[in-house]
Image (tube, grey):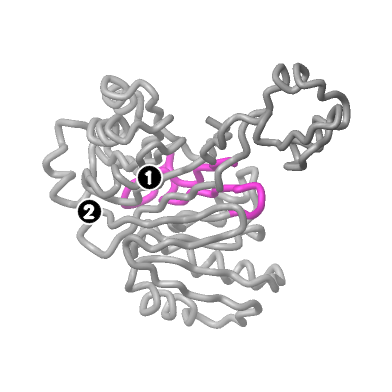
Amino acid sequence: MRITFLGTAGSWPTKERNASAIALDTERELLLLDCGEGTQRQFFQSTSSFMRVRRIFLTHFHGDHFLGLPGLIQSMCLNNRTEPLDLYGPPDSREVLERVLSLGYFTLRFPVTIHPLAPGATVELDGVTVRTAEALHPVPSLAYRVEEAPKRGRFDGEKARALGIRGAHFARLEAGETVVVNGRSIPPEEVMGPPRAGRSIVYSGDSAPSEKIAALAHGATVLIHEATTMEELESQANDWGHSSARQAAAIAREAEVGELFLTHFSARYKELEPLEQEARALFPGSRTARDLLDHLVRQP
């Protein structure tokens, strides 16, 4: 699993940062979380290709989170895409996205399906599950959790050798087969540890501090949470449905996540180190994201 931050700006792009977009490579397909203006150009500078995007999950319909969509879809058409594209978003998705698909003069060369999602909805994909929660923002908004299926437990080589298991039997057991050694059947469960949780990534979208997002993020491998301001502007940020770096860290600590990435920074902040320091004071595993940063999500 690999996260590529394509845009980390809040509200509008700056010289340093593009509008919100995150590419998530699940190893089986490339998902796009939000699609602010300029997203397709960011793809050209990244390690990913927008032609691989199979599904786009939009948190809400403020322009900095979806205005890159018309250009991206039309560029896919110009590059002769034929594979289907699925668009997911909050309950008002159909009304907004049908208008997006009718903008300008172009020929839509592939099927596009719109999936409005209610808070609490679940989407089953190939190898991952996507769950939603309501974000705390002035317009209908969703947060997303993308989670792998549980993994088989780790192989206990020492125990296997003590049972006389050798050579090719190891591979068969790891593949889930029962083997027979010295006349005794040994199922995989006897030499494998308990199942392990799959990797999980939670993206808040735009939101004031929310217990619903904290619950969605509980135990996640990575939480990507907006941090529009620092603590001194926290009250104003909350009034507009946003969070401070300190509040994002408080959510990460409450949810007991593995890592926290801050994103969606106000244009007033040219340097991001103060926001990172503010978050680390509460949650040491905090980092500020930057445009085009790649992050490999490792197995817990």
The vertical placement of 194 against 19, above or below, is: above
For label 1, the residue is: 9
Quadrant location, the N terminus: top right
Instruction: List x then y, in percent, for residue 195.
Output: 56, 37
Q: Which residues are magenta?
A: 1-30
Residue 295: quadrant of the picture: top right
For label 2, the residue is: 136
Residue 134: quadrant of the picture: bottom left
Instruction: List x then y, in percent, for residue 138.
Output: 20, 60
Residue under the image location 26 percent in, 23 percent down: 282
Along the line of sight, the residue nearer the viewer: 123 or 90: 123
Instruction: List x then y, in percent, for residue 108.
Output: 60, 80
The vertical placement of 95 against 250, above or below, is: below
Disc 1 element: loop
Instruction: List x then y, in percent, for residue 23.
Output: 54, 49
Q: Residues within 10 Å of mark 2 (few under 14, many from 20)?
A: many
Verify whether residue 71 appears in magenta. Answer: no
